[in-house]
Image: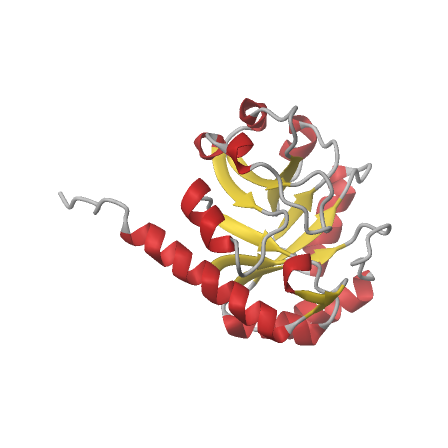
Amino acid sequence: MTRVKICGITEFEDARDAALLGAAAIGLNFCKDSRRYIEPARAAKIVEKLPPFVAVVGVFMNHPDPQHLEDFAVSLGLHAVQLHGNESPDYCSMIQRVKVIKVFRVDSGFRVDTLRSYGSGTFLLDGCAPGTGKMFDWELAYGANAFGSVIIAGGLDADNVSQVVTTLHPFAVDVASGVERSPGRKDAEQLRRFVAAATAAFAATSASLPAVSKS
């Protein structure tokens, strides 16, 4: 598996294809105003039928009660929650039984040291209009790795994912619209190309790291 998350899954067939191609995670969107919203009952069926070793991430925004959100995530079998709203550090710290991925929209007002107040966690950096395929200025994300594990999203596709991996050295990459034929429905060939390109880029980046000394 490679460090790729395929987000906005609404059909089991797309989840299965992503898993078989080697994606490490899929994303299920529970924001009701999203074009990729999935009903919990439908999501549960996808989670139940997924092969092993594939993480399932639930996408949420400004849920009023972190404990209720955590209970929902655990009951559905989610491994992590991806928070796209104005969730505070205290809100995020109240979720303990699943991993938290805090999302930040990167624009001219974004500062990487904003991540510091959330502790050493996992952060997803996205464009100002998530799910639309619009990229952000990657230079604004320089230094983000110092504060935790960084996932890059926003306008990625098979043609530019290698560049973002070699430029920003993220922990992982996230894609939705860049592998779709319509919102919520993935294209098998675009999936294949994206995962292959990301896998090659991460492998090349890892190969360039200094060897770990043995004592």
Asked whether the viewer can see residue 68, the reply is yes
Seen in the image, is 139 located left or right of residue 98? left
Image quadrant in which you'd find residue 184: bottom right
Asked whether the viewer can see residue 2, the reply is no
Q: Residue furthest front?
A: 159
Q: How is the image coloured?
A: secondary structure
**Residue drawn at point x = 13 percent, y = 43 percent:** 215
**207 in relation to 41, above or below:** above
- Residue 140 % position (x, y): 55, 31
Image quadrant in which you'd find residue 77: bottom right
Pick the front one: 37 or 159: 159
**Residue drawn at point x = 71 percent, y = 38 percent:** 128
Q: Which residue lies furthest to the left in this view?
A: 215
**Residue drawn at point x = 41 percent, y = 56 percent:** 201
Q: How many marks?
A: 0
Pick the front one: 79 or 10: 10
Image quadrant in which you'd find residue 18: bottom right
Pick the front one: 94 or 119: 119
- Residue 196 % position (x, y): 47, 66
Q: In which quarter of the image is the N terminus?
A: bottom left
Seen in the image, is 197 located left or right of residue 133? left
**55 in relation to 16, above or below:** above
- Residue 156 % position (x, y): 59, 53
**Residue drawn at point x = 78 percent, y = 53 percent:** 30
Seen in the image, is 129 located left or right of residue 213? right
- Residue 114 % position (x, y): 59, 24
Q: Residue furthest right?
A: 33
